[in-house]
Amino acid sequence: MSDRPIKLERDEQHMFNVRAVVAGVFILFALLGILGRVYQLQVSDYAKYSDLSRQHYQKRIPIPPNRGQIYDRNGVLLADSHTQYVLEVVRDNIGDENGDGKSTLADVDLFVERLGGLIPLVEKDVRLFKTQARRFKYQPIPIRGNLTEEEQAVLAVNAPRFRGAKVVKRMERYYPLVETASHVIGYVGRIDARDLERVDKIEYTGTTHIGKSGVEASHEDRLHGKAGFELIEVDAHGKKQKELGKQEPVGGQELFLGLDINLQIVAENLLKNERGAIVAMDPSNGEVLALASVPTFDPNLFINGISQKDYSALREDPGRPLFNRALQGAYPPGSTIKPMVGVAGLIEGVITPGSRVYDPGFFRLQGQKHAFRCWNKKGHGSVDLKYSIQQSCDTYFYDLAYRMGIDRFSAGMRQFGFGEKTGIDLPAEASGLMPSKEWKEKRHKRSWFPGDTVNIGIGQGYWLATPLQLAHATTIMANRGVRLKPHVLRGVRTARNQDESILKPEPFPSIEAKDNYWTLTIQGMENVMRPGGTARSSGDGASYRIAGKTGTAQVFGLAGGKYNAKRIAKRLRDHALFVGFAPADNPKIAVAVIVENAMGGGGTAAAPLARKLMDAYLLQQYGENMLKPAGEVVHQEPVSETPPADAEKKTPKKKKQGGE
């Protein structure tokens, strides 16, 4: 037998020590891990888990704010809100068929299906409800608005079968003047998934509507207000036990527009039974006094989702009532731009105040046989700028545009705001088209020809302008070069009845020109309204001085034929245009008028409308039906009282020149 002991105490002691150290290290790391986790839960993530804990017995219920009202400059109410009843659903309170208070998305689908058998549901409202239900489990989400008394009664009787559903009172938008100024005011509609992507989802929880067009859309941030909330304690099934706190919502601001609603009504009535637009502005501050696009539409139809029948009727209407002609309509400006072209020619030194051109009734490019006709086939003889504006002599402006060249011509007209958006605070404004060599090369893959420049000289060819751009350019003429940004918002009032001023409009660079250049062209515009002018009948008997310019824009080429409005289809008739301002010596209103496919030119179809509009505003000739404010009007701070120091539609084929 070996003398080696069976039990080696020394080895066993070493092994024990090693195991003890390993165990100690393991226990130490375990304790450190536990302490770290405790620190994370109790210190680092305390707020997070505390909030999660509170959510089991506390709920934060949003309270949507009341939408701000909209008034005209005199306090006449244009957009208001009235009470409606809305069905709201809290997803977490729906429960399953066993009523255990827990809900899944499948339960939501089943709930909606059962509810649809009780009251009518709109498909897009259901889609939006399900979208929001995925995100908000504990907050009320609207699923049906504008409930009738009968539907409310049905829901009350069946309330036990639909846990989580509740009928609540909410404020709903409506437009008391119906179709009047509908393109300016716009309308609200039900919030959809696209709207939710661009707004603060928390602020809009519980809000059912959002601005979709017009002022309602462009000033949504002012009109919406700030949501409040109610903090409540609930039981295990989500039922309210008591109120823990409440923060009242802040209503949206009340907006006061520069719009004179009585003038707006006059403008829309003047265009009755026609298609066209009228824009009136205050030259001293850029406020839009009237912005009429006819035909109009009823914005109340859109509030809770327009029916397919009504929407189809609007879409299929040949008058295109949803189309805002004043902002989006792109038309050849015709001869209305001749005063602006004259100023640009004087600034460039292409002509002088005494420059004269002989007009035999046509203009020819050197070495070419083609004749660009003047509207007066007999011609006007030897004419200067002032007389050419008065008589709208095409030949003078053919020659002027040709000698300027398209580069200088386009640059000069861009100073008057053509070819770019004015920046008005309304959505979907069109930029029109001020053509150039580069534009034609890119758009038509063809070079610019001298004949293109000649046509542009009388506002034809590729040139397209909106009625708002024409009104804006006319205010620049009235202000002798000072440019002011057009705007519809005049002032605001908060829900706390405190006046607030609005930032002044962004100043535009003024057009620098000698004062006698402005005087000369404005005198020509005044002569348009006097004996011998193209709008003399519209100036007869005026108690104030008017500066104006007529225009006629061709819709299709005559190809040498004689134009007769009575013998061609209405859609092929010329457009009649007029721009002007008054009083000429102290401008208070600038106007642009376009009558589509008119029976007559600018002097007979458009100028009389402008004269009536000016009479209504300057002489306050609104008649007995003049709208008055319902209550006291608060002071509204103007956007701008003093001028600052510095202040695509498809392109048509080239048209034959036209005149008055």
Image (tube, grey):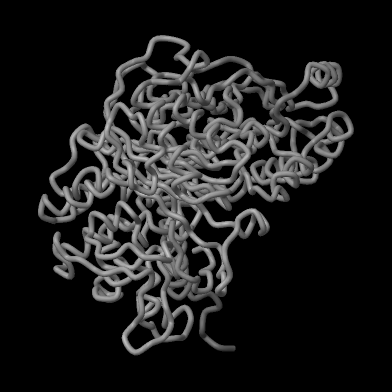
222 left or right of 180 in image:
left
Instruction: Please report the residue visible at 47 percent of the width from the left and 23 percent of the height from the top.
Output: 249
Residue 447's place in the image compared with 351, above or below, is: below
Please state, as top left, top right, bottom left or bottom right, where the N terminus lies in the image.
Answer: bottom right
Point out residue 86 in the picture as x, y percentages from the top left corner: 69, 25
Residue 31 at x, y = what percent? 43, 52
Is 540 placed above or below 39 here?
A: above
Residue at the extreme right of the image, as rendered: 117
Q: Which residue is painted at 43% across and 62% down in the image? A: 375
Q: Is residue 442 visible?
A: yes
Q: Is residue 210 visible?
A: no
Where is residue 161 drawn, in percent x and y?
85, 25
In the picture, which quadrant includes the C terminus? bottom left
> Compared to 60, does 245 lie above or below?
above
Q: Spot the residue most to the top.
A: 631
Where is 469 relative to 229, above or below? below
Q: Residue at x 31, y 66 (%)?
A: 397
